[in-house]
């Protein structure tokens, strides 16, 4: 029984092998016959080739559709990849241009402030030093600035500090490479001023607010809101006609001044030495320390109004 089953398995295997050989031989013979026929009668072979192509053309077309779809998909993926790379490059360029935009805006603001500084025409006999504000320092004063210019640059205590809008303050302390600016709005700042077209004399006194007060004003003086306030030149603290601000409000004889320098942040200033000694403590100390000989000339005494004005400005 076992031998019979083995024979049954061997017979189909032999048949398959014989069929494969017969198919192989038949294909070889068909190819040889086609070659002989093509040599003998080319027109017949051409018609047969056309017929075969005509039959196979729809099949080839249908088979090419998936290939075309794959090609289109590959092209689309390549296009998306190129777009992604272009978008990344554009974002990089945009970020770089935004950085340059910030630099350009900062330079534009700086140039605007420097152009405003150029509007001020100093007296030919004065000495000026341009400086950049590096810090807003409270310290001993509530309203003060630190500038990057000091004794090595010719800056001295009491020098006037201005920008394109007007008077910023005065130099309160000097170091070799920096200086402290006491702002007009500080509690310790006093300056003689002239108000309006009539140039009414008064004292501008800072009180640590954005709008300093007008003090020592004649009770009969007529002052209106909007009157221009400039330095009067009294007491030799500052020269005359340095712009300070305008009258902002009048309330129960409390007169407030809106400063010109509050319109924009102060980043650059001009330090001006007008050659005045009205509020420089060192100069007064040097004069008071000078020995007076018995026959030497006495120092001229300041007139009472001027002395009082200078003392008020130095407080």
Image (cartoon, grey):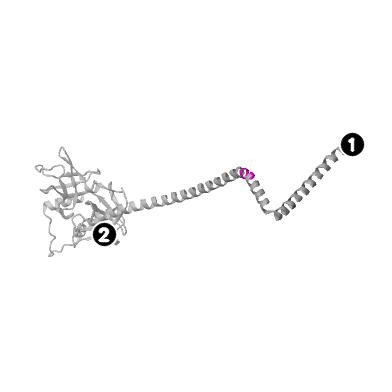
The magenta span reads 55-59
- Going by the image, does 65 lie left or right of 176? right
Q: Nearer the viewer, residue 71 or 259?
A: 71
Q: Is residue 227 magenta?
A: no
Question: Who is closer to the viewer here, 56 or 132?
Answer: 56
Rendered residue at 26%/59% (across/down): 129
As drawn, 127 above or below 142? below
User: Is 267 left, or right, of 24 in this rendering?
Assistant: left
Mark pair 2, 1: CA separation = 122 Å
The residue where tag 2 is placed is 129
Residue 4 disc label: 1
Of all residues, the one furthest to the bottom in this rendering is 295
Within the image, what quadrant is residue 177 found in?
bottom left
- The image position of residue 246, as x and y in percent, is 18, 45
The spot of residue 195 in percent (x, y) is 14, 47
Along the viewing direction, whichever of 210 and 4 lies nearer the viewer: 4
The stretch drawn in magenta includes residue 56: yes
Figure quadrant of residue 257: top left
């Amino acid at each position: 029984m076992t031998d019979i089953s083995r024979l049954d398995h061997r017979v189909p295997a032999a048949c398959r092998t014989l069929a494969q050989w017969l198919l192989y031989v038949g294909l070889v013979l068909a190819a040889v016959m086609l070659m002989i026929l093509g040599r003998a009668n080319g027109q017949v072979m051409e018609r047969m080739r056309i017929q075969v192509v005509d039959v196979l053309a729809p099949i080839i077309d249908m088979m090419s559709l998936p290939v075309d779809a794959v090609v289109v998909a590959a092209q689309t993926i390549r296009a998306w990849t190129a777009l992604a790379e272009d978008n990344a490059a554009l974002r990089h360029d945009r970020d770089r241009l935004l950085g340059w935009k910030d630099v350009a805006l900062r330079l534009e603001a700086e140039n605007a402030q420097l152009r405003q500084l150029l509007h001020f025409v100093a007296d030919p006999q004065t000495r000026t030093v341009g400086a950049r504000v590096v810090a807003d320092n409270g310290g001993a004063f509530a309203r003060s600035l630190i500038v990057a210019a000091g004794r090595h640059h010719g800056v001295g205590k009491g020098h006037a500090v201005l920008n394109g809008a007007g008077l910023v303050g005065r130099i309160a302390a000097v170091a070799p490479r920096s200086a402290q600016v006491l702002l007009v709005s500080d509690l310790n700042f006093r300056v003689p001023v002239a108000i309006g077209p009539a140039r009414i004399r008064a004292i501008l006194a800072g009180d640590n607010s954005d709008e300093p007060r007008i003090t020592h004003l004649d009770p009969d003086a007529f002052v209106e809101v909007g009157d221009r306030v400039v330095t009067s030149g009294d007491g030799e603290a500052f020269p005359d006609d340095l712009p300070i601000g305008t009258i902002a409000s009048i309330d129960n004889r409390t007169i407030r001044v809106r400063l010109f320098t509050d319109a924009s942040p102060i980043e650059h200033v001009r330090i001006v030495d007008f050659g005045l000694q009205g509020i420089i403590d060192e100069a007064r100390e040097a004069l008071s320390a000078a020995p007076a000989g018995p026959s030497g000339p006495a120092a001229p005494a300041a007139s009472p109004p001027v002395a009082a004005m200078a003392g008020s400005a130095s407080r």
